[in-house]
Structures are given as C-alpha cells and as structure tokens.
Image (tube, rainbow, N blue to C red):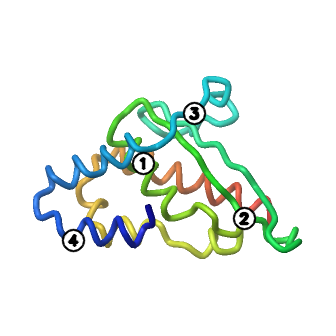
Amino acid sequence: MSIDDIMTDFTVLDDWEDRYRYIIELGRALEPLDQSEKTDATKVRGCASQVWLVSVKYVIENDISDPTYRFRGESDAHIVQGLIAILLAIYNDKSASQILNIDASAIFNTLGLNDHLSPQRANGLRSMITRIHEEATESC
C-alpha cells in the first residue's frame, strides 16, 4: 500500500478509534521478521516498545552512489507495528537521497497522528525516522 492510499483512507475515516483500528490493520498486514533478524544491530533505540528495523540496500541502473532501500520492521506493540507500516509506505523503494529529502514528520502531521500519539510513541516514531535517515546518510 502506498502512502497516498493511506492518506486517502485516513480522510474517509472520521473517528479516531476507526483510524487507530486502521493503523493496527496496516501493521497486521506486514510480514513478520524472522527471529534471526531481531538482533541488537536491528533494534531501534529510544522506543518504549520493542522495535526492529531491517534494511536492504540495492542498486538501480548501476547508480551505486545513490542506492535504493527496502525496509522491513516489527514491533511487539500493535499501534507501533502500524506506525512501522506507514513508515515503510513512505520510505520503501526510495533512493538514499530521496529518503533524506522526505519529511515523514510532516506526513504524520498531515494525517493528524502527531496530535494523537503519546509522548513515548512520538519519541519512538522519531527514533525510527532517525534510524532510517542514518541508514540513508551512510550511503551518501
């Protein structure tokens, strides 16, 4: 699902309980990580719940200086798993330079999520975004 699809779906849902249910469903649709992928290296620091992000870097059209990324992730918290799904919709299959130019916080603000996340979840979300940007920065 694309971030545009998610944003469109959000406009249809009037009630925040429905939006939370939708976010949880997005998370449930993610393929779980293999247990071997849940390592100290893939764990995201700064999240109240357990979060792991795995990235795969690949090159399109021999552009080794600006690789493209595909992320996968998992959390032990349902709502955080849904937030991961939204992040993946934002960042997957984007080049490192594109990733660094995306303002995911602005997208979450457009969705209204910044006002509806607990401070702990908002900190965790920032940690996940920072982790994704750090991965992209290493390539540039």
Residue 81 vertical position relative to residue 128 in the rendered view, above or below: above
Mark 4 highlights which residue? Answer: 11
Residue 17 vertical position relative to residue 4 in the rendered view, above or below: above
- Is residue 138 shown left or right of residue 47? right
Residue 12 vertical position relative to residue 72 in the rendered view, above or below: below
Callout 2 touching callout 3 (CB < 8 Å):
no
Residue at image x 50%, y 72%? 103
**Residue sitting nearer the eye, 81 or 133:** 81
- Dot 2 or dot 3: first in sequence order is 3
Q: Which mark is residue 68?
A: 2
Residue at image x 26%, y 66%? 9
- Is residue 57 shown left or right of residue 63? left
- Dot 2 or dot 4: first in sequence order is 4
Q: Quarter holding the N terminus? A: bottom left
- Dot 3 or dot 4: first in sequence order is 4
Amino acid type shown at disc 3 = Leu
Distance CA(mark 3)–CA(mark 4):
30 Å
**Residue sitting nearer the eye, 126 or 7:** 7
Could you say whether the residue bearing mark 3 is in a helix, strand or loop? loop
Distance CA(mark 1)–CA(mark 2):
26 Å
Residue at image x 48%, y 31%? 50
Could you say whether the residue bearing mark 1 is in a helix, strand or loop? helix
Distance CA(mark 2)–CA(mark 4):
30 Å
Q: Quarter holding the C terminus? A: bottom right
Amino acid type shown at disc 2 = Thr
Mark 3 highlights which residue? Answer: 33
Distance CA(mark 1)–CA(mark 4):
25 Å
